[in-house]
Amino acid sequence: EEVPLLSKLLQSQLYCSRGQWGTDVFFHDFFVTSPYLTRNPAEADFFFVPGYAICVLEGNIYTLDQVDEIYKELIPSLPYFNVSGGRDHVFVFGSGMAHSVFQSWKDYIP
């Protein structure tokens, strides 16, 4: 895996794919199975950053502060994030809390 920190936010995919948190898993599955997926970063129009933040929070895997810390460590480790200042990176926060699951997002995501 190119970005090992992602594994912390991708736990419990089966559990997370049902109910109100399924949006995060749906988008991840959609992009992974897309016929337009490329493994060549030079061909990519955007980079999808998967994460089931609300699910790992509500599943008591991590606290809100821990989720925030994971994202704060994750973003600098994304290999192509700084090429465009992150403007071509797509994050999904598909819960009622929206981006609030990543409390520091304004400091990290343009």
Image (cartoon, rainbow, N blue to C red):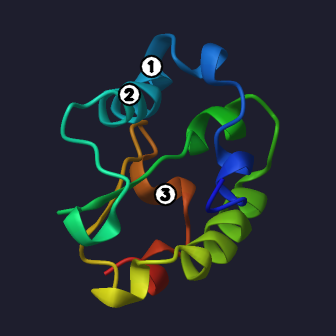
Disc nearer the start of the sequence (3/1): 1
Residue 103 place in picture, x, y as percent: 55, 67
Say which amino acid is labelled 3: Ser
**Labelled pair 1, 2 in contact (Cβ < 8 Å):** yes
Q: Residue, x 47% and y 81% (percent of image)?
A: 108
> Residue 36, labelled with which disc?
none
Say which amino acid is labelled 2: Thr
**Labelled pair 3, 1 in contact (Cβ < 8 Å):** no
Q: Residue, x 58% and y 39% (percent of image)?
A: 54
Residue 102 place in picture, x, y as percent: 55, 62
Q: Helix, strand, or loop for circle 2?
A: helix
**Which residue position holds label 1?**
20
Q: Residue, x 70% and y 37% (percent of image)?
A: 56
Exactly how many numbered labels are in the figure?
3
**Which residue position holds label 2?**
23
1 vs 2, front mark: 2
Quote the CA–CA distance across marks 1 and 2: 7 Å
Say which amino acid is labelled 1: Gln
**Labelled pair 2, 3 in contact (Cβ < 8 Å):** no
Within 10 Å of disc 3 (Cα), the crowding (few <14, some 14-19, many 20+) is: some
Q: Helix, strand, or loop for circle 3?
A: helix
Q: Residue, x 63% and y 62% (percent of image)?
A: 3
> Is residue 45 placed above or below 63 in the rendered structure?
below
Quote the CA–CA distance across marks 3 and 1: 16 Å
